[in-house]
Image: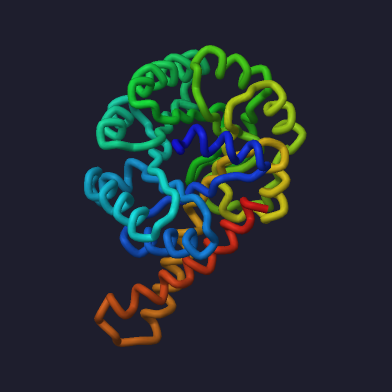
Amino acid sequence: MNVKELLKECAEHRQAVLATNFYNFETLTGVMRAAQATDAPVLLQLTRSSIDYMGLHQAVSMARTAIADYGVRGWIHLDHGGSVELVERCLDAGFDSVMIDASERPFEENVATTRRVVELARPYGVNVEAELGYVAKLGQQQGGGFTTADEARTFVEQTGVDALAVAIGSAHGFYKQPPHLDIERLREIHAATPVALVLHGSSGIPHDMVQQAIAEGIVKVNLATEIKDTFMRNLKAILTTTDEIDLRKVFPKATEAVVELLIEKYKMVRG
């Protein structure tokens, strides 16, 4: 099964795949242990910053080895690829799915860039995701710039993209105000286009609200901020209460907190 088929399966069962970012061995281990415990499929996400930190081939090797060792269904996805050049590198490195994010550019430029990536990815047979509308990134003002059904229909028709991250009220990072997803808008977008719909910025959104979005067409839910925040908060707390210098004894305790977080998140997306 490839990622396109995975997302289609999720749509048929009104479920979603939890797409989790990892940043090092410890967060990867947390993701894999939780997925194994819940028998959930794994979509491991890497951003440019994580690729720069770990190295492209080392990060891919870590992910492939973990998928095999834990015996779960798993794939690797490029999250928020900001350039065609990065997408090409990831395609050559064997990614199963790639995202090109030109959402901050004018509509026509977003279309042209996305269409270029779709053409590049076609020989590899991988899933291509894009973003349409304004999903605030870290440090940006939240709110506004929601995706419309008409824009989504036109964008998909002109690009041939497989999956579309839509702006319906979510944001990357933590929320300054309680999040509210525009479910009616999501319902309209879902009716307007057959592509797989993606929710970015799920960290901090109440589980019932995410589940409502899944019921109305979301088949991929991205989770990043809560993973690294959980790991770092628990690691800091541990370090203030011990003089232990053996990181092999300290880090696993923080990883355990990530496992607990993700077990609940995997349950959330599978209903």
Foreground of the two, 72 or 27: 72
Q: Is residue 86 above or below residue 171?
A: above
Foreground of the two, 239 or 270: 270
Task: Classify residue 188 as left or right of residue 220.
Answer: right
Q: Residue at x 40, y 57 (%)?
A: 71
Q: Position of residue 166 (x, y in %)?
A: 59, 32
| Residue 119 location, quadrant | top left
Q: Position of residue 73 (x, y in %)?
A: 44, 49
| Residue 56 location, quadrant | top left
Q: Residue at x 40, y 73 (%)?
A: 235
Is residue 145 visible in the rendered image? The answer is yes
Q: Is residue 171 above or below residue 254?
A: above
Q: Residue at x 64, y 30 (%)?
A: 146
Q: Position of residue 214 (x, y in %)?
A: 67, 43
Q: Residue at x 49, y 41 (%)?
A: 137
Specify the farthest residue to the right: 184
